[in-house]
Image (cartoon, rainbow, N blue to C red):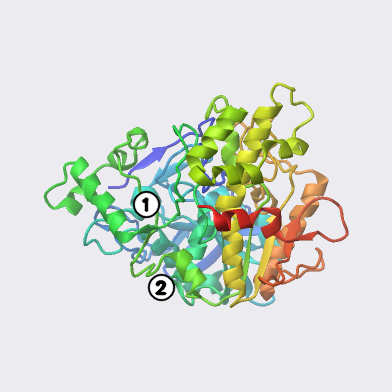
């Protein structure tokens, strides 16, 4: 039985490094004219939206409900006549705090939105398939309106939903597909694109798979998955890769974790969690039949997030047919699809989580010198003194805002030092490591989004510099609305110019496998020997600066510490 819930946007967003971006409401503007496309399952009626045509809420697989809960995605049932595709489908079940206000959620959520230029194509257009982030537990593809990307870049853009959390990454001993249902959904969407790209003027032989945050980690997983081979011809990885790590301190956590935690988990770990869940819910006889009958709230309701004994499911499993090898190891060993790659991060990734940690309404941590020492000791043990020498809080005085009171300066400097540690350890240096591995075998282009004046994604304390934090690059590529109370992101003229350059880079890569465009400075190819990183800035320079990010982000520190 299908269950839909109405969710509202909470005022505070938990600071997860693999958090999702929230965007425009799922219902798009009313149709201005009838636009039809014939898919392999039937004809759909879309809408005209500005200079684009959009086909919203198109199913790419059967609803994964009832007996199909925790089964590999099945073909959608064909329909007769014309199916309306004028409103986005519901988001997949997950936490509501980072969805657009009023978004419906449901297990019946395996749909895509397709956006094309309204004009007829002179030839089949490149297709760009975007995977949203959200820690593999939340988010929705309909949060991203790619109209500017489609029209400026002359591409077809597909955004998708995939099963999340317990519905996407549950495992149980002997259950086929355990731990990877969400990744299998992404593959089903890619196969749908292969079958239907022509119906929307797209070229199935020229598909760029791209994603941000957890979506980018998913893209990296697909690079290493034998089952995904042949469904895409290039990739773009934004703010995550196969080697990305989790933050060591979250809002509300009593202390940092001293271990590196990756997005991936061995199959036996995931199936053990499933067995624990079955026992917790009293499903001791025919456990899977019992669990498939469990109501949504019993599996993903608010109580499950506040119960520390409830098993968590947000880590794709490896040692499976979908992911035979840990993706991080597969990339290092060259076991991945040999397609061109763009990969990069934001300059201040870690400030997103740190802003939540120091927010008096959320994390409530004050980074006094004593607290900074205690937290680094707890996180890094015997390596803590070396970490503190590399990230002295006083060196971040230059980043302080002019309105910072003298009494707050040491606290803000400590918070910025902690954010820089997390930026480098968990995001930038692992991403550069994967860029090195990719560049040895395929054309690779590396960037850093470095607009430190970008609109912050969530409210930050008045004296905390938001910087180019995690998620701040998204409004430069999509029309998005940030979580309440931030609202729509408003870009200055200089930022709008950078947005146009970024869209030109992204879509030229889709067209030619290289980010080369007359609309933006030359972007050189990356290699470990010549590690040139394209900095995306609004500094007005004739050419954007190139840097060696391994030096700028102290990656030698993280090659010698745990």
Residue ranking furthest to the right? 542
Q: Position of residue 26 (x, y in %)?
A: 53, 46
Question: Along the line of sight, which residue is nearer the eye, 397 or 452?
Answer: 397
- Residue at figure coordinates x 46%, y 61% from the top left: 82
- Residue 72 appears in the rendering: yes
Q: Is residue 540 above or below residue 505?
A: above
- Residue 236 appears in the rendering: no
Residue ranking furthest to the left? 285
From the viewer's perspective, tell me whether residue 3 is left or right of residue 240. Answer: left
- Residue at figure coordinates x 51%, y 60% from the top left: 243
Give the number of the disc on residue 227. Answer: 2
| C-alpha distance separating marks 1 and 2 | 24 Å
Give neighbour class at mark 1: few <14, some 14-19, many 20+ (Cα, 10 Å).
many
Badge 2 element:
helix
Q: Earlier in the sequence, mark 1 or mark 2?
A: 1
Q: Position of residue 511 (x, y in %)?
A: 67, 73
Give the number of the disc on residue 87. Answer: none
From the viewer's perspective, tell me whether residue 396 is left or right of residue 253. Answer: right
| Mark 1 lies on residue | 108
Say which of marks 1 and 2 sits in front. Answer: 2
From the viewer's perspective, tell me whether residue 496 is left or right of residue 272. Answer: right
- Residue at figure coordinates x 74%, y 53% from the top left: 499
């Amino acid at each position: 039985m299908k269950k839909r819930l109405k969710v509202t946007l909470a005022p505070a967003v938990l600071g997860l490094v693999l958090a999702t971006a929230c965007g425009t409401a799922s219902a798009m503007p009313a149709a201005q004219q009838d636009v039809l496309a014939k898919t392999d399952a039937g004809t759909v009626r879309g809408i005209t939206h500005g200079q684009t045509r959009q086909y919203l809420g198109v199913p790419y697989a059967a609803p994964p409900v009832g007996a199909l809960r925790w089964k590999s995605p099945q073909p959608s049932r064909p329909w007769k006549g014309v199916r309306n595709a004028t409103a986005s489908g519901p988001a997949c079940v997950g936490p509501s705090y980072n969805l657009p206000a009023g978004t419906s959620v449901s297990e019946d959520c395996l749909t895509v939105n397709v956006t094309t230029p309204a004009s007829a194509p002179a030839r089949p257009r490149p297709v760009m398939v975007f995977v949203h982030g959200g820690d593999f537990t939340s988010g929705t593809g309909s949060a991203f309106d790619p109209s500017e990307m489609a029209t400026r870049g002359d591409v077809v853009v597909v955004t998708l939903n995939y099963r999340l959390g317990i519905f996407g990454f549950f495992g149980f001993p002997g259950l086929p597909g355990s731990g990877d249902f969400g990744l299998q959904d992404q593959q089903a969407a890619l196969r749908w694109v292969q079958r239907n790209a022509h119906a929307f003027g797209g070229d199935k032989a020229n598909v760029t798979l791209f994603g941000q945050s957890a979506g980018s980690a998913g893209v990296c997983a697909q690079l290493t998955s034998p089952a995904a081979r042949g469904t895409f011809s290039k990739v773009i990885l934004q703010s995550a890769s196969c080697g990305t790590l989790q933050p060591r301190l979250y809002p509300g956590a009593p202390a940092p974790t001293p271990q590196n935690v990756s997005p991936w988990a061995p199959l036996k770990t995931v199936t053990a969690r499933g067995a624990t869940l079955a026992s917790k819910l009293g499903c001791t006889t025919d456990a899977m039949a019992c669990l498939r009958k469990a109501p949504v709230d019993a599996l993903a309701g608010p109580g499950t997030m506040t119960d520390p004994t409830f098993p968590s499911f947000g880590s794709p499993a490896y040692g499976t047919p979908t992911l035979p090898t840990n993706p991080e190891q597969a990339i290092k060993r060259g076991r991945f699809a040999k397609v061109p790659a763009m990969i990069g991060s934001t300059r201040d990734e870690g400030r997103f989580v740190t802003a939540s940690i120091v927010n008096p309404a959320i994390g409530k941590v004050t980074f006094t010198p004593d607290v900074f020492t205690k937290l680094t000791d707890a996180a890094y043990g015997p390596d803590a003194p070396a970490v503190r020498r590399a990230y002295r809080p006083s060196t971040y005085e230059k980043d302080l805002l002019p309105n910072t009171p003298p009494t707050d300066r040491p606290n803000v400097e400590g918070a910025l030092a902690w954010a820089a540690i997390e930026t480098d350890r968990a995001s930038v240096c692992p991403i550069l490591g994967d860029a090195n591995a990719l560049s040895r075998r395929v054309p690779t282009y590396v960037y850093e989004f470095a607009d430190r004046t970008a609109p912050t994604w969530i409210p930050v304390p008045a004296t905390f510099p938001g910087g180019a934090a995690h998620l701040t690059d998204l409004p430069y590529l999509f029309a998005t609305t940030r979580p309440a109370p931030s609202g729509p992101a408003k870009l200055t003229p200089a930022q709008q110019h950078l947005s146009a350059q970024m869209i030109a880079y992204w879509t030229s890569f889709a067209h030619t496998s290289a980010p080369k465009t007359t609309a933006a400075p030359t972007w050189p190819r990356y290699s470990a020997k010549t590690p040139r990183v394209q900095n995306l800035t609004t500094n007005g320079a004739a050419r954007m600066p190139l840097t060696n990010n391994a030096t700028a982000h102290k990656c030698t520190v993280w090659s010698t510490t745990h």
